[in-house]
Image (spheres, grey):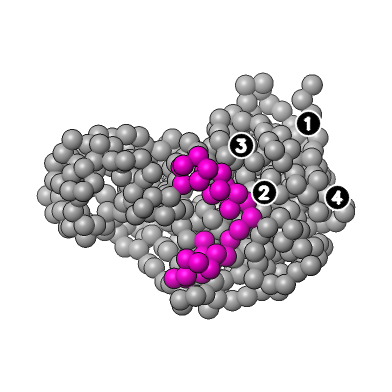
Amino acid sequence: MPDHHYDVVVAGGGPSGIAAAIAAAREGAKTLLIERYGFLGGAGTAMMVNPWMSYWAVGKEDHIIIFGVLKELIDGMTALGAYGHPKQMTAFDPEALKVVAERLCLEAGVALLFHSFLGSVQTDDSGRFIQSVRVANKAGLTDFKASLFVDTTGDADLAALAGAIVEKGRAVDGLSQPMTLNFRMANVDIDRMPSGEEITRRYLEAKARGEIHCPREDVLWFYANQPGVIHFNTTRVILKDATDPWALTEAEIEGRRQVQQFVAFLKKDVDGFEHSYLQTTAPQIGVRESRRIAGEYVLTAEELLAACKFDDVIARGSYPVDIHNPNGEGTVMQHLKPGEWYDIPYRCLIPRKIENLLVGGRPISATHEAHSAIRVQPIAIAIGQAAGTAAAICARDQVLPRRLNARKVQEALARQGASLGIKVK
């Protein structure tokens, strides 16, 4: 009979969930990782967001600031010949990410449950402690109990269902950053491709002619690992709430409509694409922003841009403030100074009101502006590793997350190979 009781239950098998589950299991916790798809990877596989953004200090590729599970994933994909490209050093093969993530989880002793969708949360009479989560799958509805829970759904689904305080979008109107359906073109004569600026110029001309209807101001593309394949992260679906299933459905449909217009444009107007074809679209639309928890500490963009350091640091990042206009065209980019990075404090992982829950990945406690920087996959992996580590320690020592000394988390992360820029035992 399957076991329905664990020390730690992790909901969501994306980048953050992978790291959280591995870390929790390695710290001795009996760990279950629940994933809605039949594979791990989330943003890197289901949403096909590629390549990974920087995991080094600004402008210093030799000064790596994120190690731990991220490095293990990179090493695993590199061994398969599926990481890096001469012109895109952090490009990776989503299929390789799936198998490497699975292997690391299984080797750590994580119990994996695929094709299972989080449906509801049961709390005690006080409403402050989660007793179990209910998932829907081919067996019907199943409850799983745990001492600690980790929300790595990307959308703070578990936190919201448990009754935690959550926010969505920017303060002025609640609108979130737009969604993007990623796609890839194959059989491209890459040597004949114009510059990125020239492709954008032709795209804007096609928009002016009414041939493309996409509220984005440029064309964003990257090299993929496969010869003759170009990855596009350039559709833009605005004014949709990723936590509303009806709006999410509309976003998927709109994303595919835009992709078809881009395919026609590329084949007709861009050198090197004459004989190309649409290789694939992502299994689901990419979501930049939805819910965020209100936690013990709210991280701000001003702190990130000032490269603030915190005593309870559990992860680091250097990705800039990167806000795609929720209303249409325009993208705001604000970079840190060269050689800098920022800290992410443990307190941002602890939601108010709920006692036995930690949050990993992009829904941690931060402003809309700060969220735009910490949402990328390498940072989410680092945050997830910290969340899983803290959950395991809490389960073992029978202490609540908000009562846990962050130094214990830092020491455990150091043993796991993470790098926090501080001295620990």
Residue at which label 4 appears = 396
Disc 3 element: helix
Residue at which label 3 appears = 102
Query: Mark 3, mark 1: which one is toward the viewer?
Result: 3
Decide which of 235, 419 is in the foreground and name it: 419
Q: Residue at x 12, y 49 (%)?
A: 209
Residues under labels 4 and 3: Cα distance? 25 Å
Mark 2 and mark 4 lie on one chain; the one further toward the N terminus is: 2
Mark 2 and mark 1 lie on one chain; the one further toward the N terminus is: 1
Mark 4 and mark 3 lie on one chain; the one further toward the N terminus is: 3
Residues under labels 2 and 4: Cα distance? 16 Å
Above/below status of 70 relative to 2: below
Mark 1 and mark 4 lie on one chain; the one further toward the N terminus is: 1
Residue at which label 1 appears = 4
Provide residue 400's location: percent of width, then percent of height: 82, 56
Occupied quadrant, residue 158 = top right
Query: Mark 2, mark 1: which one is toward the viewer?
Result: 2
Disc 2 element: helix
- Residue range highlighted in magenta: 55-83
Provide residue 248's location: percent of width, then percent of height: 44, 41
Mark 3 and mark 1 lie on one chain; the one further toward the N terminus is: 1
Provide residue 202's location: percent of width, then percent of height: 15, 53
Residues under labels 1 and 4: Cα distance? 18 Å
Above/below status of 353 relative to 231: below
Residue at which label 2 appears = 20
